[in-house]
Image (tube, grey):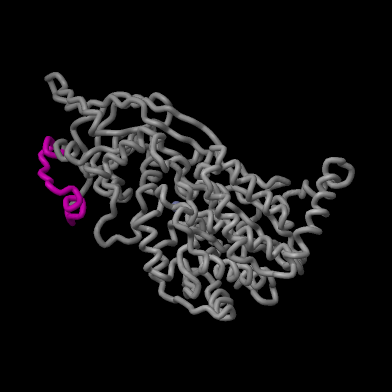
Amino acid sequence: MRGPNLAKAGRNCNAATMLKLLFAALAALFFVFPAAAQELPTEADLLRHIEILASDRFQGRRPGTIGEAMAAHYVAAHLAEAGVDPGNEGSYYQPVPLIERRMTDVALDWVRVREERRDRVVPIGDDDIVAIGRSESEMLDAPIIFAGFGDPSELAEFAVEGSVIILLPGRPADADDFPGYRQRLGQLSEMGAAAIFGISEGGPSWQGTQSRYRSGRGGSADTPMAPIEGAIVEDIVMRWLDREGIDADNLEAFANSTEFTPVAFRSRLRGTVSSNIHHYNGYNVIGRLEGAGDLDERIMFLAHYDHFGVCRPEDDDDKICNGAVDNASGTAAMLEVARALGRGERPIRDIIFIATTAEEMGLLGAEHFAEHPTVPLDSIVAALNLDMIALSGAGAPVGIVGRGETPLDPVIDRAARELGRGIYDDVDINAFIQRQDGWALVQRGVPAVMAGGSFTDPEPLNAFLQGAYHTAHDDLDNGIELGGTLEDAWLHISLGRILADPSQYAPPAR
Ligand SMILES: [Zn+2]
């Protein structure tokens, strides 16, 4: 349902608003005339946004920080300047409830229950297990099940409810559509598991896991979790299996074997898990460019503007993950798309612009929008996500992350050709489909894709993914590639005009 447009409703008799209008009119004199002469954005326009959003002043735009608030205001101000109205019942902001849980103390014992003899109690060392609780203090005394990869169908005959589930985080061999780890956690917590532990091989990745639990694990406040969730090193699990008379020197191979069934242990896990829990909000920024038609249909542009914030120790020279490519670049392009589409003749369909928060925490802002949409999801005829676009130089062919999954391919291919660009029609880049905000919409039947040249040139893409990606080096110190960014911004302006026009794009009935 469409919310009331409070920004417009309040425009009649408010002196402050009149002043704002006066300023807007003056600003229009200075800005609109020169800008109108040159319809399309330039590299300089994009660079200006990226330099500001990825500057140290914005502190890496981590949800819940001042840096996020500054970036959210920056985006909202530029949407307003582009003539885009607030998109959430009179506000540009949609709060996204988030939660951070930090491990403070874990005291767990492995307890071998022995009939007519005292239980054998073995404390688990601090270095071998990490956990956080659903509440600040969780007590546990429950039997253990080794669940292999945690396939819920294999667990049907086991008493998951009230048990500790130990599982491998990977996927079984040859099971591409096996649910991801997070999804399995959700399924197991729904089945009533008292605690869930993922198995870690140890080594450097285990150190990373430990430090993440100690520094805090963020998530959506709406995501259900088991009373206790954590991770445990493989050696301990192998020792327990050995005690149960199972000799498995390779847990993956054991869980992959055809005769594998989950193992209900004769031992229990007992103790307490203490955590620090912090509730806060991130903010999606949502704007709506009202269409000239009265169709209850709209198109949508998305770009996540959040990043990892201060991501290195305080005494590091470069401690801020600025997120210039990821995703100041996509945000910048979306703002320029809004500016271009806000000018001149109004598109027929509404255009929604959403700068999402908490993407880096697992598409949480986009998920929140999809669960609490400001417009009916089935009225969105196309959604285009812009993520990490400053990678390829000019001339990169246009690929579609999500090719073959929506009716949008021919429209995008045609728009690309009209701009003189080549087409990359390989579906290998669909490997990114679950790693971007559009996924939250695709799963709910909204035709959402990510189109452009940044994923079609493997050399800069792989160099980035294996280099600066998600580190403090994703900044402007070494410059940034704007050739492809600009072409992708132009492509999206063109797509905005085509897709918002019913005479150029009629979606098939859903
Ligand atoms: Zn990222």
Which residue of the protein is positioned furthest toward the right in this rendering? Answer: 13
Residue 249 in view of the camera: yes
* Percent x, y of residue 468: 39, 54
Which residue corresponds to the image point at 22% horizontal and 28% vertical from the top-left? 125
Which residue corresponds to the image point at 42% horizontal and 25% vertical from the top-left? 136
Dividing the picture into quarters, in which one does residue 407 lie? Answer: bottom right
Residue 364 in view of the camera: no
* Percent x, y of residue 272: 32, 24
Q: Is residue 283 above or below residue 484?
A: above
Dividing the picture into quarters, in which one does residue 120 lie? Answer: top left
* Percent x, y of residue 262: 22, 45
* Residue 228 belongs to the span the image colors magenta: no
Viewed as shown, does residue 10 lie left or right of 173?
right
Q: How many marks?
A: 0
Q: Nearer the viewer, residue 468 or 291?
A: 468
* Percent x, y of residue 92: 67, 47
* Residue 245 belongs to the span the image colors magenta: yes
Which residue corresponds to the image point at 70% horizontal and 76% vertical from the top-left? 503
| Residue range (magenta) | 241-259
Q: Quadrant of the C terminus?
A: bottom right
Which residue corresponds to the image point at 17% horizontal and 53% vertical from the top-left? 253
